[in-house]
Image (spheres, rainbow, N blue to C red):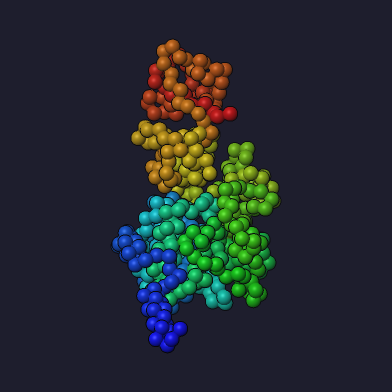
Amino acid sequence: MCNKQLILAASLFLGFLLNFPSLSSAYNRADRRSFQRSIVDSRSRLNPGFKKVKRKKTQYIIVHTSELGLKTTLRVVLKGKRLRNGRTTQGGHTHYVIARNGRTYRILDKKFEADHAGLSMWNGETDISKISIGIELVGYHYAPISESQYRSLGKLIDILQGVYGLDDRAVLTHSQVAYGKRNRWFKKNHRGRKRCAKNFIRAKAELGPTWPYDPDVRSGQLLPDPQLAGVYYGRRGYYAKTEDANIISKRNTAWSIAGEDYDSRTTVYKFPGGQIYTGDQISDNVGWKRIPAKTVVLLNQENSVFLKKSDGPIKTISDSLTAWSFAGKAYNLKTTIYFLPSGGIKFGSTISDWDDLPAKTRLIVGYRGPFTLYKDRSAYRIAGSKYKDRKTLYYLPSKELVAGDKIEDFDRLPAGTLIFLPYT
Ligand SMILES: [Zn+2]
């Protein structure tokens, strides 16, 4: 190769580098621009009592899962949340919220500090809220993050990395950076206070690997949380398993599911026998070591009285109880059936996501039907000897949903009543 060719080759290579400054980026300028235009600006709805303070430096991007549905997430991050001591915060709990359908909301201008990470530490630095951007994904740490959320999150992170000059290692989850003071489970300061976003699969947001170790555990500042250590620094792929992650087992304790909220009034324990306790009732009524296996743990259930009333085959969704809370991974099965407040019926297989369900939607899990009752087709002909069973459900034209054992006169059931039978 002569000199001229060499210079040509070198300048071509240089030109290549200059034209493509961010070779690692998976998104082009048009992607980023159209995403930015699609962000819903909610800054004007922020609690006026929130004090805006400019952030001095930006070292991290922290990903959270909100452990709530969309409406409640927006309310909490904008207006504030109730603390255990009864006080209410001033909102400003994140910079961005990403809904299940990928729609992204701007809550607070990114130049200000958001109150999102609480008691936190990373690589020796504490109070991570002061040096980071917060992103809330609507959903639970024990349910998969949606593909649409990953797509929006990837673009948002890519844009923020460009603005602040951050690499992929600067992107961490809240459960990675939160820490707690000593408690009944740990003798010293420790990881595991939060479980937030432990189901986050980095590659799905076009991100490379995270830290291969926890710097504050390595330096001896914090004790590790065994489960989180396995998720983040153990064998690959471990954290993809989310299906049964809010169900108590030997490995999955109240602590590993709820973190610091294990004994909170808003954490609900649904025992396999049907009994329901809130976190603050366990120690007096049951004892922390005696929670039975297969107990389902639900976080952020402000309305637990409602839950108690709806125990039985018919469940009702309040605004903070999504279909996922009740039906878990069965939320989109054909045998999970939803009764909308408008009177319509939807089968799980036609539900695209659990955010779209209006409050007061009722649902039943593990059912088949409907079988229509009319003059020559009685309840007995449809349900057999089980027609009076509490698990056989009747949906009356008046939109009432009634169990078989509550019906007094079967001859007076109106024609057009729909019967649903447990799927066995
Ligand atoms: Zn969080």
Q: Nearer the viewer, residue 31 or 128?
A: 31
Q: Position of residue 306 (x, y in %)?
A: 48, 41
Residue 89 makes an appearance in the image = no
Q: Residue furthest bottom?
A: 3
Q: Quadrant of the C terminus?
A: top right
Q: Quadrant of the N terminus?
A: bottom left
Q: Residue furthest top?
A: 376
Q: Nearer the viewer, residue 87 or 130?
A: 130
Question: Image quadrant of residue 148?
Answer: bottom left
Q: Is residue 296 left or right of residue 101?
A: right
Image point (37%, 66%), residue name: 28
Q: Position of residue 263 (x, y in %)?
A: 59, 54
Image point (62%, 53%), residue name: 254
Q: Residue furthest front?
A: 2
Q: Nearer the viewer, residue 275 or 417?
A: 417
Image point (43%, 56%), residue name: 149
Q: Position of residue 368 (x, y in %)?
A: 50, 29
Q: Position of residue 21 (x, y in %)?
A: 40, 75
All told, the count of numbered labels is 0
Q: Nearer the viewer, residue 341 or 286?
A: 341
Residue 323 makes an appearance in the image = yes
Image point (57%, 17%), residue name: 385
